[in-house]
Image: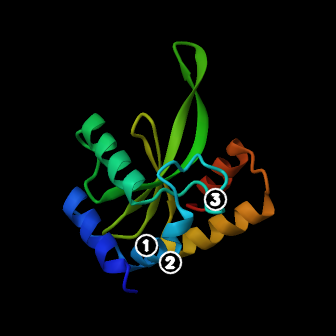
Amino acid sequence: MEQQQPLKVSIKKELGVELPDSFANFLATHGECLDNNPFNRSKWKSGFGDVHFIVGTTKAFRSQFPDFPKPLVIIGYVGEKAIVVNHQITSIDVYIALDVETEEIYMVDGLGKLEKAGKAFDEWFNTFIVCLKNHEQPHKHKLLEYLKSLSH
């Protein structure tokens, strides 16, 4: 795809990693449907961020967590999950990360905790879309549980 190369160059320049073809093709094909704010539910691929989101959010994770693996890039936002802090329930954000070396997908929370969510981007993405189609208004906790179950 002709648009794929500039996207790959931009990510490589900004983050120092090269996108796998599967994800670069996704960005080139669906880039107009993506947003720098993946919370925007007016786009059918809500949850996935554009190049600006990917670069900015990945840089933020790398800055906040010095041990954050360099091959991981944040590609989207899933929602929130509840955790207990000081005997109180609080919510933290959960993002989707792509390992550019293995193409594995991870859920990473706002504290930097990683959980494997899929073995390959294409496979995971197709399952994610089926899940969204089956749940027009997906409940965040059900979606998180479903995505977590894919890694087992």
Q: Position of residue 93 (x, y in %)?
A: 52, 37
Q: Which residue is mark 1?
A: 23
Q: Position of residue 126 (x, y in %)?
A: 62, 73
Q: Residue at x 51, y 48 (%)?
A: 37
Separation of disc 3 and disc 1 at Cα? 18 Å
Q: Which residue is mark 2?
A: 29
Q: Amino acid at mark 1?
A: Phe
Of all residues shown, which one is farthest toward the bottom? 1
Q: Position of residue 53 (x, y in %)?
A: 41, 51
Camera-near label (1 vs 2) is: 2
Residue 43 is tagged as 3
Image quarter in which the C terminus is found: bottom right
Q: Residues within 10 Å of mark 2 (few under 14, many from 20)?
A: few
Q: Image quarter for residue 83?
A: top right
Residue 74 is tagged as none
Camera-near label (3 vs 1) is: 3
Secondary structure under badge 3? Answer: loop
Q: Amino acid at mark 2?
A: Thr
Q: Position of residue 130 (x, y in %)?
A: 71, 69
- Residue 90 as seen in the image, left or right of residue 104: right
